[in-house]
Image: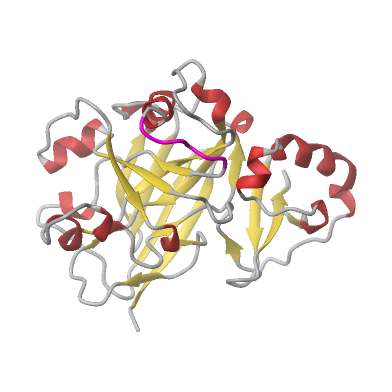
Amino acid sequence: MKLIRFGAVGHERPGLLLEDGSRIDASAFGEDYDEHFFGEDGIERLRVWSSRHAALAPRVAAEVRWAPPVARPSKVICIGLNYRGHAKETGAAIPAEPIVFFKATSAIVGPNDDLIIPRGSEKTDWEVELAIVIGRRARYVSEAQAPLHVAGYALHNDYSERAFQLERGGQWVKGKSADSFAPLGPFMASADEIPDVQNLSLWLSVNGQQMQRGNTSDMIFGVAHIVSYLSEFMTLLPGDVISTGTPAGVGMGQKPPRYLRAGDVCELGIQGLGTARQRAVPSE
């Protein structure tokens, strides 16, 4: 299944993306796609509801906003330098263990919402990434068990302000958490929709020029390892989002470096997980 949410900011509703490309309103199911939904076997309950009611559910008009497909995750956890090509372009050594940082959940927006360039920013950068959505509470799970704790996957652009991240001391979270820095979606595909998560192509372009082209096979640490590893240090709750790193081609890695300015347009996609488009606008 492909889970969506739609509607104006603050008034989002749950829905489904059907095989024919149409969107339906799943409000009658009675739950949003949040921690309770994922933790109480929501995917399977929704599957049953859909088989009985999807044909009669209201359609969502094409012009209605795509919202983030997951509602209010408890945390967004990110993995840094997790593609061999990206580590090479930054001049970094291959990490011996996953590099872990957080994004503020207030950074989450819809897949086609504007990117707001932060006040004082000169180095806002792009990063196309595969996001994992946790489906079952995970604590000290093995790599073999890890896939059982995954609800599904989504497209994510892990925007970064490199000066805030790397030049002003402290942790990376400062450069990762500005409003609009975590566009998610257009949908969350349930895990059964993605037969081989370690063989997905992903790409990103800026103003029509391709900047990133990679494959999840280039990950240093795969999805199962990441889920297992993180569960050693924190409880992963249903609905939590884990962003798994970006391939080569980020702005910081260009020669000379290239960063986003108001008016620029990022378009990105992952095989089986759809596409997204964000236009950069100045901060108010």
Question: What residue is shown at x 59% (from left), y 53% (from top)?
Answer: 69
Task: Name the residue nearer the viewer: 131 or 273.
Answer: 131
Classify the position of the N terminus by image quarter.
top right
Image position, residue 2 (x, y; %): 65, 44
Task: Name the residue nearer the viewer: 62 or 106.
Answer: 106
Question: What residue is shown at x 64% (from left), y 39% (from top)?
Answer: 39
- Residue 58 in view: yes
Image position, residue 190 (x, y; %): 62, 36
Which secondary structure type mostly characterizes the magenta part of the structure?
loop
Residue 111 in the image: above or below residue 79: below
Task: Name the residue nearer the viewer: 223 or 72.
Answer: 72
Question: What residue is shown at x 14% (from left), y 55% (from top)?
Answer: 166
- Magenta span contains residue 235: yes
- Magenta span contains residue 193: no
What is the span of residues highlighted in magenta in the rendered image?
233-238
- Quadrant housing residue 174: bottom left
The colour style of the image is secondary structure
> Left or right of 24: which side holds 173?
left
Looking at the image, the residue that sits furthest to the bottom is 284
> Left or right of 145: which side holds 102?
left
Residue 106 in the image: above or below residue 32: below
Residue 173 in the image: above or below residue 93: below
